[in-house]
Image (tube, coloured by chain):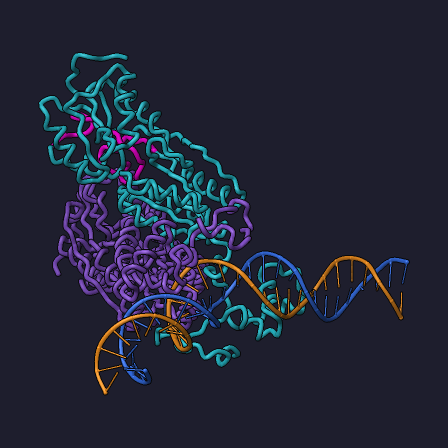
Chain colours: A purple, B cyan, C orange, D blue
DNA sequence: ATCATAAATGGTCTCGTGGCCATCATTGAA
DNA sequence: TTCAATGATGGCCACGAGACCATTTATGAT
């Protein structure tokens, strides 16, 4: 036991009396070498004679020494830490994304710090600050709605952080991104429903630049137009990506005098709300109504009928994002690429031709 | 623009040329005060004359200065960072736990670092090391199975970290803990099924000290005994808490010559596997079989029939855990309390009296 | 006017590690 | 024997903020 008397330093909190943790100096002292030599045992061991190396390693083992990452990163400016901002960690899409991205980054020696913005740029602003306080080297962000964090993201980039947006990308955002091909997915969804004979189709959420600027909502009317359809004004209602608002909106839409015959939920969470509302109204899928949703969550295959979904390549998206981070941090490659990944329509049993066929048909 | 020429220091990575981030010295220089005074503008502003304060604040705003948390924590030994080890972040129980605990800790100025152990102490060991490398002040851990991390947890405690276990607690573990009252929940579940007339009840997983040391499995036979029932040897099969193993086990159990009339899934994820297997065998709930599961996940209310569940007070558990951390870190209160929280049986429609009533009945 | 007191401000060291340069020892060749 | 080259090791400072003590300045009482 060396180390104890050398310095009479007391930590502020009484809990830490006697709790000094071994550092590289203690290791060096115990091994009878200089701190520099001790460090080399960790960083480039071949530079030491086998005997010295063994002695230092013995000391490390004896003291249970483990380097302090904070101190190590202090000099370089950034830490081997990456921030991940998700909208909501309880949303499986984000949980899976976090897991996949985290694994890749960890394998490369980075630690992920996750935070939530609840789809709000205002909350995001605070989270970004916290992450910057930790001097993360990069931030993967699913941007929240609103302008409150945009300027700050730019400032972070100027400070040397690598910023990447995923899942959502504000208009004209200059940051590299990893996105689902929302337009193509929406086209495929609409085309599929149209082919079944639907003309009165509603998406759970209409585009709104402030409240609901989602690409899926924006491209829905375009996809409809491509099939020669249009979205009735009564169906155009702004909502959020939460279960409750989707539930309320579904009730509203199905209460119309000319209700939609097919519903497209934009996320798996929305689909839960829609599903609840549909059941409450005593409607049966797919006879009374067709339902299609983004996100291939486990439960969608479990309910009756199993729900037709558009599956997102979550792992591939997370991997693309993580690899972009590694390229930027380790190879200095400041790409500004916008990666777009394809989704996949998985047809199950929640969609069928509409009951009472109206005027339009064919395509 | 001060700061540029003062030091000709170049960061190792070329990306950081010219990217020096403002520190408190830069602020002080710009405001024309000493670094100490500049710091005080942040920590105890009342100690400054209003004019000086304003000048420093102006400088802070102009430079966009934000303190480096790493440097700040270096001196004190620990950082304002807390590690959270979950088994799997895609399991909603853990995602919710992480969210709730994270919010409380963040509100108190801490940052949460999440990592996964996949129910394995071996993997956990590595994650703990990573967390310790960041010098987290505390670790909330859902322990993985196996001995590989126990000694290390003790060492971390000796180094001053506050360790708390939640959701699972190895036998004789000395660390404070926050647990569901698994025994009571299991008793209630078994009593409920028994009251419906079931005698052939199986839990999805039998206690095994190495592979499956879950309290729920351990207390299941006890709960059965209290109702005068016993668990047939054929039902006693060791499994894991994953969907696939639960799926396989359900198939096995239902393939027996005397299959159980009621199944208890130990987690929501297990329930998904069980549900799939039940459906594949063409069995109908609750007529052919009763199913009851831990975890009140959203989908359990959505499927047909809605599944009877035991709800865990996830938020309360997370809050209890987070508060324990804050008490330990801020008030120096090293409690070793084992908190146990009650679950709640939510009866829905997946349980009914068994079809062909065998010998036993009543209770 | 003088001194005591408190308020405001500054100086200096610490934390643990990484990077760079200096030093010392050893070896082999001229 | 001397010199150069190489290998092994050590010294020193930077990083950014916190803690503590020292110093300067203002205030008020005697």
Using the rendered view, name the quadrant where residue A327 is placed: bottom left
Residue A256: x and y in percent read 31, 48
Decide whether residue A48 is among the magenta residues. Answer: no
Decide whether residue B296 is among the magenta residues. Answer: yes
- Asked whether the viewer can see residue A208, the reply is no
Residue B330: x and y in percent read 53, 45
Give the residue drawn at x 41%, y 42%: B163
Question: Height in image: B298 above or below A217?
Answer: above
Residue B19: x and y in percent read 42, 75
Give the residue drawn at x 35%, y 73%: B13
- The one nearer the camera, A138 or A29, is A29
Name the side, left or right, on which A259 lies relative to B79. Answer: left
Name the side, left or right, on which C14 lies relative to A237. Answer: right
- Asked whether the viewer can see residue B187, the reply is yes
Using the rendered view, name the quadrant where residue B207 is placed: top left
Residue B216: x and y in percent read 29, 29
Using the rendered view, name the quadrant where residue B277 is placed: top left
- The one nearer the camera, A350 or B36, is B36
Name the side, left or right, on which A12 lies relative to B214. Answer: right
Give the residue drawn at x 47%, y 41%: B323
- The one nearer the camera, A20 or B333, is A20
Give the quadrant of the C terminus of chain A: bottom left
Q: Which residues are drawn in magenta?
A: B282-311
Name the side, left or right, on which B11 lies relative to A201. Answer: right
- The one nearer the camera, A274 or B264, is B264
Question: Height in image: A317 above or below B312?
Answer: below
């Amino acid at each position: 036991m060396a180390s104890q008397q050398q310095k009479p330093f007391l930590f502020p909190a009484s809990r830490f009396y006697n709790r000094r943790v071994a550092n590289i100096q203690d290791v060096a002292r115990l091994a009878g070498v200089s701190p520099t030599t001790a460090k080399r045992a960790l960083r480039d061991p071949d530079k030491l004679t086998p005997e010295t190396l063994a002695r230092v390693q013995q000391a490390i083992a004896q003291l249970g020494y483990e380097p302090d990452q904070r101190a190590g990163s202090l000099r370089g400016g950034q830490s081997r830490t990456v921030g991940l901002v998700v909208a909501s960690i309880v949303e499986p899409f984000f949980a899976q994304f976090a897991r996949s991205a985290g694994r890749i980054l960890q394998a490369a020696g980075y630690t992920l710090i996750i935070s939530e913005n609840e789809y709000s740029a205002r909350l995001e602003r605070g989270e970004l600050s916290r992450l910057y306080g930790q001097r993360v080297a990069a931030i993967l962000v699913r941007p929240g709605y609103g302008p409150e964090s945009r300027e700050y993201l730019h400032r972070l980039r100027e400070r040397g952080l690598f910023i990447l947006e995923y899942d959502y990308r504000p208009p004209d955002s200059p940051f590299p991104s990893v996105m689902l091909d929302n337009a193509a997915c929406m086209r495929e969804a609409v085309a599929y429903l149209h082919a079944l004979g639907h003309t009165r189709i509603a998406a759970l959420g209409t585009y709104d630049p402030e409240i609901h600027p989602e690409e899926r909502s924006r491209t829905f009317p375009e996809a409809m137009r491509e099939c020669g359809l249009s979205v009735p004004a009564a169906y155009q209602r702004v909502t959020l990506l939460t279960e409750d608002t989707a539930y309320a909106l579904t009730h509203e839409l199905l209460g119309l005098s000319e209700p939609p015959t097919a519903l497209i939920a934009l996320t798996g969470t929305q689909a839960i709300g829609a599903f609840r509302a549909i059941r409450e109204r005593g409607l049966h899928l797919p006879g009374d109504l067709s339902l299609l949703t983004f996100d291939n969550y486990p439960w969608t295959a479990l309910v009756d009928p199993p729900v037709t979904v558009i599956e997102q390549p979550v792992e591939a998206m997370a991997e693309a994002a993580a690899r972009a981070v590694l390229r930027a941090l380790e190879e200095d490659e400041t790409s500004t690429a916008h990666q777009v990944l394809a989704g996949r329509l998985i047809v199950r049993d929640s969609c069928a031709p509409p009951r009472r066929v109206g005027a339009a048909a064919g395509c």
